[in-house]
Amino acid sequence: MKTIKETLDSLREHERRQLLYGFEHEFAQFVCLSNGRFIGVNVKNIKHLEVEQEAGVWAIGKIKGQENSCEE
């Protein structure tokens, strides 16, 4: 499993900006990754996100009920 930093570094520019905006303004934001996974900031209280790794307010994990991707 990639670290939070490695995953953040591999995101597209607009995805990284979305997360950094949430970080700077202290509200929840997350970006869908492949295989029903996510990376996010301030997401502890989002019930459908299962956090597997944390670093401060940053988290990475699985989206409950999503086996494939976030795209429908």
Image (tube, rainbow, N blue to C red):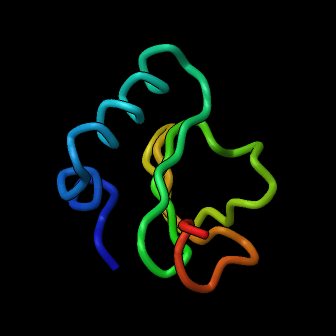
Q: Position of residue 7 (x, y in %)?
A: 28, 60
Of 32 and 44, nearer the camera is 32
Residue 64 as seen in the image, left or right of residue 20: right
* As drawn, 30 above or below 63: above
In this rendered view, identify the residue nearer to me: 56 or 1. 1
Q: Where is residue 49? Give x, y as percent.
A: 69, 60
Residue at the location (62% across, 85% down)?
Answer: 67
Image side of residue 48 versus residue 41, left or right = right
- Name the residue at 55% across, 37% down: 29
Q: Residue furthest bottom?
A: 67
Residue lying farthest top? 25
The structure residue drawn at horizontal position 63% and vertical position 43%, both measured from the top left corner, is: 43
- For the point 52% across and 75% down, which residue is it? 69
**Total numbered circles:** 0
Name the outermost residue toward the front: 72
The reply, left or right, for residue 7 in relation to residue 19 is: left
User: Quarter of the image containing the N terminus?
Assistant: bottom left
The location of residue 34, given as percent across then percent down, is 42, 75
17 over 30 or under it: above or below: above
- In the figure, residue 27 lies in which quadrant? top right
Name the quadrant of the C terminus.
bottom right
Depth check: give the residue in front, 61 or 11.
Answer: 11
